[in-house]
Image (tube, helix red, strand yellow):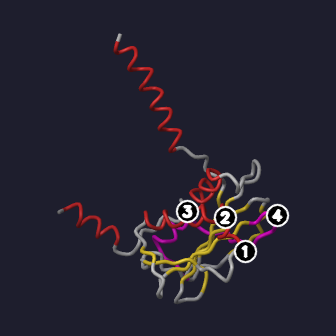
Amino acid sequence: MKAQTFLPCASVLLVLISGCFSYRELPVEYDYSYKGRFDKYNSYDFLIQGENAELMSTSGTTIYNAIESHMKFLGYKKKSNRPDLLLSFRVFADSLNFRGYNQPKIEDWMAKKDRDLEYQRMKIGMKEGTLLIQIFDRKQKSSIWQGYATDYYGKVDFTDIRDVNNAVKSILNKYQFFADGFLEEQQKILSQ
């Protein structure tokens, strides 16, 4: 009898736990610079200009926190004085045409680091409710990576914290570069 009552409880617990961790990956596109030194960065800060209306909104705070959490997970240190990377984000409420690039997957490019590849421009039609996250190399003074998500099945609801977190996760799952020295540091900690 106890085995019978345990099984339904375990099933309910499993469903609840999986519901907490599941999310619906949005269609994401990203572009990157062939001048990016993705394996050499270890610090970041946000590029905030004046009274940033995006950041003052509830969804802006959620986006900011989700980006910060992802960067921390990858081992980056937030640093206000001369960080390697500057991060920015923007929500586009209306539809727009955006210039992107047709490029090899960033993982494939990193294996060869061919900095002489040609950029193949392409226009991307973005629907309403698009989130754009950009990463700039502070020393180069240029964008090295940008990711954007829009839900082709309907707009992202930027008043819903789950939708916002889902959009940020979907984008930043395409930026999977650990901070320079982070993995070695973790290996030392584990070996002690």
- Numbered disc total: 4
Q: Quadrant of residue 133?
A: bottom right
Residue 168 numbered mark, or none: none
Q: Name the residue under label 2.
A: 148
Q: Looking at the picture, which amino acid does disc 3 mark? A: Leu
Q: Looking at the picture, which amino acid does disc 2 mark? A: Tyr
Residue 172 numbered mark, or none: 3
- Secondary structure under the numbered disc 1 in the rendered image: strand
Residue 94 numbered mark, or none: 4
**Labels 3 & 2 near each other (Cβ < 8 A):** no
Residue 47, percent across and down?
A: 59, 80
Residue 135, percent across and down?
A: 58, 75
Q: What is the distance, in whole Å, between disc 4 and disc 2 at their CAs?
A: 14 Å
Q: In this view, does 14 lie above or below 76?
A: above
Q: What is the distance, in whole Å, between disc 1 and disc 2 at their CAs?
A: 16 Å
Q: Residue at x 47, y 38 (%)?
A: 17
Residue 103, percent across and down?
A: 62, 69
Does residue 70 appear to the left or right of 180 in the view shown? Answer: right
Q: Is residue 73 above or below residue 35?
A: above
> Which badge, 1 or 2, comes first in the chain's sequence?
1
Q: Which residue is drawn at 44% across and 78% down?
A: 43
> Which badge, 1 or 4, comes first in the chain's sequence?
4
Highlighted range, magenta: 92-115
Mark in the foreground, 1 or 3: 3
Q: Name the residue under label 1.
A: 121
Quadrant containing the C terminus is bottom left
> Which badge, 3 or 4, comes first in the chain's sequence?
4
